[in-house]
Image (spheres, rainbow, N blue to C red):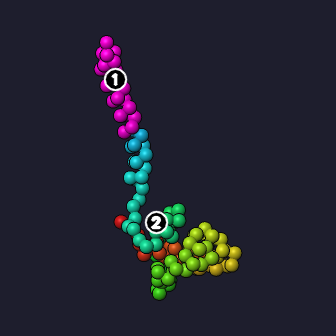
Amino acid sequence: MSWTTKIARRPLLAGLVGVLGLGIAGGLLYEVPRLAHRRYPRTKFDDLLSQLDDRDSAAKLGATYIAQEPGFDAGAAAVALRHGPGNGSLPRAIDADIAQAHLASVHGWLVPESLALVAGIAAKFPAN
């Protein structure tokens, strides 16, 4: 008697379908949150913009900052953030700005200068 005659087809197929169903369910649980996440166009400033917790709120703050600073240059702001006290790290740059009292006034609010700069960059490159 061979091993193929000892295995019933229906339980085997039911098991395979069950395993396949679990694989599909796991894949959906993994991918659906990523698909629902907001997409932004790729920019040369993604290393800085990816450090923002809420890019849309930062873009609103940045639009106000840009309105007050008509000569705002995103490239120069990125160079200042990458080579400044934080060396590309937004949290370190914000901490250094607070410690050194480098603050920017944005519509009556005082915010760290590095946060105002990265918010200005976010305003220049909004979501699709």
Answer few, some or many: residues within 10 Å of disc 1's Cα (few below 14, many 20 plus, some between 14 and 19).
Answer: few
* Residue at 57%, 78% in the rendered image: 83
* Residue at 47%, 75% in the rendered image: 121
Answer few, some or many: residues within 10 Å of disc 2's Cα (few below 14, many 20 plus, some between 14 and 19).
Answer: some
Regarding residue 71, the answer to whether it shows in the image is: yes
Measure the C-alpha gap from mark 2 to mark 1: 51 Å
Q: Is residue 2 above or below residue 74?
A: above
Magenta part of the protein: which range? 1-24
Q: Quadrant of residue 112?
A: bottom right
Which amino acid type corresponds to the residue marked 2 in the rendered image? Answer: Asp
The residue carrying mark 2 is 56
Q: Secondary structure at mark 2?
A: helix
Q: Earlier in the sequence, mark 2 or mark 1?
A: 1
Q: Are marks 2 and 1 in contact (CB under 8 Å)?
A: no
* Residue at 41%, 71% in the rendered image: 43
> Residue 13 at what x, y percent from top left?
31, 25
The residue carrying mark 1 is 12
> Residue 127 at what x, y percent from top left?
39, 66
Compare residues 62 and 84 and report the one nearer the observer: 84
